[in-house]
Image (cartoon, rainbow, N blue to C red):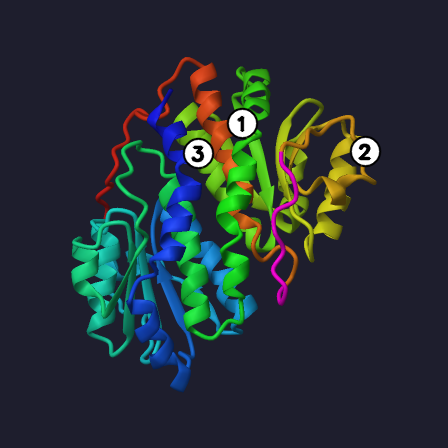
């Protein structure tokens, strides 16, 4: 068994531990921002952490109404500009805390009168030393190059940060997430069988929208780095605006299909793909899919929890990424590859 699969299976415990032992910084942040919320949030990250940042953008804008921007680190590191307005909240996300360009951007933020937060799995990292407050993800050592448990831990910390900023996400809803992830893990044998069916897959498209838009990119990234599948992530809307032309009969398209505001438009896309006999695999809630054609898709998970105050898909991103992670890991093994050691990759990537 690969380390990647072992680390995927650790996620219920990782999430439960983070919820049981929240960072002290959250209380300080809650007190600070109860007086005045930041007018703008800027998030900087790379790779899997950048997908977490994309989720954070949707989460903060939906639950807090605060405009949130994803920074382009190269603007600062290569073009030597400082695109950081005063009074912004700047968040750096890095699994290792040692990403050169992320840390360089955070150094600039520190000199711009912005308040800075670092979300990292390494509380003694350079990132942690550069920011005003650190939110450690407490995922434990992640050995596989492909990030899995640190991704979901980052998403959880973004939920916790949203609550500290004033989002009324009930803590009781967050505490249901470990059990929901455990439920997804019970479907691992079905996911493994599905991966074996696609062992000859060389290309794919992954579609997500709204709060699961980031998961589309994250799943595509995992397919690329562990199984060398040429994969692209799209929003449902962007995919329909042009890229849908690349698909044909038998082309694999993975679609995140949570209940909630995005489902109606996603269902229209699924019906369109069905008419073209595209090989569609849905990752979502079966109850919502009952009225759709069933010949070209495979359901592999049950209903994730729904938060009581926000749209039905608010808490779906963490449980929905789990079968996608499992699929990527098992597909890699079915192809005779080692998902823990992708070629030309290392755990810490240094770029400017």
Q: Nearer the viewer, residue 231 or 311?
A: 311
Assign the magenta stretch its main secondary structure. Answer: loop
The tag earlier along the polypeptide, 3 or 2, is: 3
Q: Is residue 144 left or right of residue 264?
A: left
Q: Quadrant of residue 332?
A: top left
Q: Is residue 264 magenta?
A: no
Region of the chain picked out in magenta, as a range:
301-310
The residue mark sitting in front, 2 or 1, is: 1
**Residue 255 numbered mark, or none:** none
Tag 2 near tag 1, CB within 8 Å: no
Q: Would residue 55 be found to the left or right of residue 285 on screen? A: left
As displayed, is residue 331 above or below residue 218? above
Q: Mark 1 — residue?
A: 188
Please state if 301 lies on the left or on the right of 84 as rendered.
right
> Disc 1, disc 3: CB below 8 Å?
no
**306 part of magenta stretch:** yes
Q: Position of residue 309 (x, y in %)?
A: 62, 67
Quadrant showing the N terminus: top left
Q: Which residue is mark 3?
A: 222
> Mark 2 highlights which residue?
293
| 336 or 277, nearer to the observer | 336
């Amino acid at each position: 068994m690969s380390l990647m699969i072992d680390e995927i299976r650790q996620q219920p415990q990782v999430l439960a531990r983070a919820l049981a032992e929240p960072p002290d910084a959250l209380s300080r942040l809650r007190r600070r921002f109860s007086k005045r919320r930041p007018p703008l949030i800027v998030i900087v990250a790379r790779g899997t952490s950048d997908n977490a940042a994309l989720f954070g953008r949707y989460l903060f804008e939906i639950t807090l109404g605060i405009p949130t921007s994803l920074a382009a680190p190269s603007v600062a590191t290569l073009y030597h500009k400082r695109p950081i307005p005063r009074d912004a909240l700047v968040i750096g996300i890095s699994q290792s805390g040692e990403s050169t360009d992320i840390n360089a951007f955070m150094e600039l933020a520190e000199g711009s009168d912005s308040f800075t937060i670092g979300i990292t799995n390494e509380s003694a990292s350079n990132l942690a030393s550069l920011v005003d407050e650190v939110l450690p993800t407490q995922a434990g050592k992640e050995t596989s190059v492909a990030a899995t448990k640190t991704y979901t831990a980052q998403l959880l910390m973004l939920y916790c940060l949203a609550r500290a900023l004033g989002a009324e996400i009930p803590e009781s809803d967050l505490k249901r997430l470990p059990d929901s992830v455990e439920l997804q893990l019970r479907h691992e044998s079905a996911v493994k069988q599905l991966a074996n069916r696609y062992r000859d897959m060389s290309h794919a498209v992954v579609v997500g929208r709204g709060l699961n838009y980031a998961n589309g990119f994250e799943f595509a990234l995992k397919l690329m780095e562990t199984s060398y599948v040429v994969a692209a992530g799209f929003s449902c809307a962007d995919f329909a605006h042009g890229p849908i032309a690349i698909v044909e009969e038998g082309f694999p398209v993975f679609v995140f299909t949570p209940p909630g505001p995005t489902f109606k438009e996603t269902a229209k896309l699924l019906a369109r793909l069905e008419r073209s006999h595209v090989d569609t695999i849905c990752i979502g809630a079966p109850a919502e899919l009952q009225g759709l054609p069933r010949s070209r898709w495979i359901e592999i998970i049950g209903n994730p929890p729904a938060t009581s105050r926000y749209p039905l898909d608010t808490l779906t991103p963490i449980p929905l990424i789990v079968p996608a992670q499992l699929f990527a890991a098992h597909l890699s093994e079915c192809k005779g590859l080692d998902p823990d050691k992708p070629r030309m990759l290392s755990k810490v990537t240094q770029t400017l």
